[in-house]
Amino acid sequence: MPVLLPVKKCLFIALVSLLPLFSYGAAAKDSLAMHIMEQLYSRSESSGLALIESNLYLKQNVEVERKNILVSMFPNMTLFDKGEKSYLSEFVYWVEQTQSALPKMRRLSAITTFANSSGELDCVLDFMTPQLCGERLFNNEYLSPLSSSNRNLYEFSLDTAWHSPGTVRIVAVPRFRNIQLLASASAVVDEADFSLRKIEMQGWNEQFNFKVAFGMAGDSGMPFVAGSVSLDIDYSFAGNRMAISAEGVFDHKKMLPRAGRDNAPRGYNIGVSSFVAEGVSAGLQTVQARRLPLSRTDSLLYMRKGVMLDSGKLNGRDSLDNDKGVKAWLWRVGDEAISSHTLAWGGSDLRISPLVNPSYLSYSTSKGLSYKLSVNLRTRFGKGMMLQMKPMVGYNFKYGEFYWGVNGEFSFAPMKRGALAVDAGRGNSVYSSMFLDAIKNASLDSLDFSTMPLLYYRDAHLRVSARVEPINGLELHAGATLYKRSLYGNASAILPGSDIQRHYRQFAPHFRAVWHPGMYYYIADGRKVNIGSRAPRVALDVEQGVSGIFGSQGVYTRAELDVQHKRRISSSASLYLRAGAGGYFHTKDIYFVNYAFLKDNPLPLDKEDDENGVFQLLDREWYSSANKYLRLNACCTSPFMLLQRVVPKAGFIKNENLYAGLLFISHLCPYWECGYGVETPYIDAGVFVGFENERFGRVGCKVSFSLFN
């Protein structure tokens, strides 16, 4: 039993590392300050909003102290003009934010002194959030002291020097110096009803320090929704120094209250009605209206740059309302190609990850060096209908293979989340069932894929399917896939006597049912929007290969069951569990082992799935080596797991991850894999250990850049 000792050691280390997740310890607390905070938590949670829609007027000033050529390549920056140090921009955005999601922002209009770009800075937009009482703030990068879930991460005290009738000031400081915790925060609270009047916060990340202050829209009966925002950023990164300031004013248009005990939801509908908040100014009669006056310096800067001002409206030379035509559109797309902003024209949005972004570059022991890139395009058609396209490319330097894919989806029947989807592309190479026959009698010691003359095929596919959600939480997918497999090189003599073809086509109808019980949702503009569920997600995927259609060969039935569950341990820690099984049944003639849930996908994946559902040290040939499998995966994530406590000054740690995986396939019964990883603002790294059957397999690592992820 030589494998038991390493496994026991791994389990012991994992348990010791997990203990801090369940107890942060007792924070030193000012009793009066904590009493006020408890009342504030209670009040904010009872008056939360499921959805808020607003217009945002934003005025932004940038003073460049020093810059180099790299600054325009940072995705949170923009393209600066040669020799220019002072910039002024004004924007109007449409902001939509659900209960716990990131705000969705669409630029409606703009005027700027930037000559060669729109002037959008993502580092400014991240702070333009109307809802402030969630667990996380500012692009989900910071754990908020305004959430009761984070009360033990901060120490609270009463500001005895504060003198303002009817209010008190609470000061919060973090218990750890960590990049996910604010450096300090203060809240002005009404003594009578414990509503929030004002909140000021300071923090830092790898690129800048910031100070931000929010004024509440309390006069409108919304004491926990921001009415105004003031931001100062001291940007200093890679030799670039800038002073960035911004002021914003929200004009709230629609509120969707979160259903509670007094207004019980219909099923899992978290919203009971929508309304325009009383007391809120009608405000923007046109999207160009200016909500903050220009200073004399601002006006002089506009005049120097030749920007025309007209009756307080945004209608200068760079206003998006006047920026039309193919040439202007191409110029703006070119600007976006070196940034990661969202570009809007009409009812469409374009988001491009910059080509120079190193966060798509990764290295692992089993896969070598690889690069990935994706582009997102979304166009709206009427109420609740939209077209989404996602082209993807990737290249693996170890295998010298190029991958591509295009996913398209047209939404219809918005109340039932209906959609038509088209998916085409080329992924990892696959192996035919002849590969299974060739290795079925081989011992594990003799299986060295690097020296075997393998028959592997390029795998291209075209998939068309339809999706509908007939009842809440149940998604049904149905469609068909046409595969084209092409043999690499001249390998006809590798298996003498075998009937080998260089090209195979296979046509396969497929069906998938996804059941996510207890799905919470809300209705917005006649469209059902799912929020999430606390229950496990269960998916059944079945594919039936048929012969004779489009020249297809091979008959088989592939069936897989996949169960995933993400459980919160605390506001900053979570446990991800995954279990699955699948196989090929009723096989006839040749078929290709290509599982839907157990695969090494070389194209951009959801980060969570890539970290928690993949065996990092497993050679890709193993995924095609068995006609049945059983898998179990687990991952625990927290920024305060081990290093932050052992090295208190390691504030750059964003997350620590513990991984464990178990796989049963032919020749590997089982394959164990466990690992430990650290996420930082610059790089993510993990060390993994694999055990094959009852013996040690290998130690490996995975490293990926995360600077602009």
Image (cartoon, helix red, strand yellow):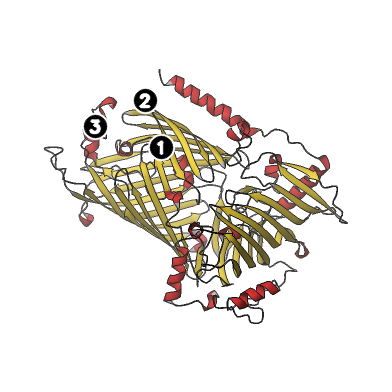
**Badge 3 amino acid:** Ile
**Badge 2 amino acid:** Asn
Q: Earlier in the sequence, mark 2 or mark 3?
A: 3
Q: Quadrant of residue 30?
A: top right
Q: Give how far across and how far down residue 424 sits, in percent.
A: 33, 56
Q: Earlier in the sequence, mark 3 or mark 1?
A: 3
Which is nearer the eye, 596 or 238?
Answer: 238
Q: Quadrant of the N terminus?
A: top left
Q: Give how far across and how far down residue 509 sits, in percent.
A: 31, 52
**Badge 1 amino acid:** Gln
Q: Residue at x 70, y 60 (%)?
A: 226
**Above or below: residue 157 compared with residue 484:** above
Q: Residue at x 52, y 67 (%)?
A: 81
Residue matched to label 1: 616
Classify 10 Å Cα crowding around label 3: few (below 14), some (14-19), many (20 and above): some
Classify 10 Å Cα crowding around label 2: few (below 14), some (14-19), many (20 and above): some
Which is nearer the eye, 5 or 566?
Answer: 5
Residue matched to label 3: 439
Q: Residue at x 78, y 64 (%)?
A: 219
Compared across the picture, whether 67 is left or right of 412 comes to right
Residue matched to label 2: 693
Q: Say if mark 2 contacts mark 3, CB within 8 Å.
A: no
**Above or below: residue 21 compared with residue 124:** above
Q: Say if mark 1 contacts mark 2, CB within 8 Å.
A: no
Q: Is residue 12 at least partly visible in the picture?
A: yes
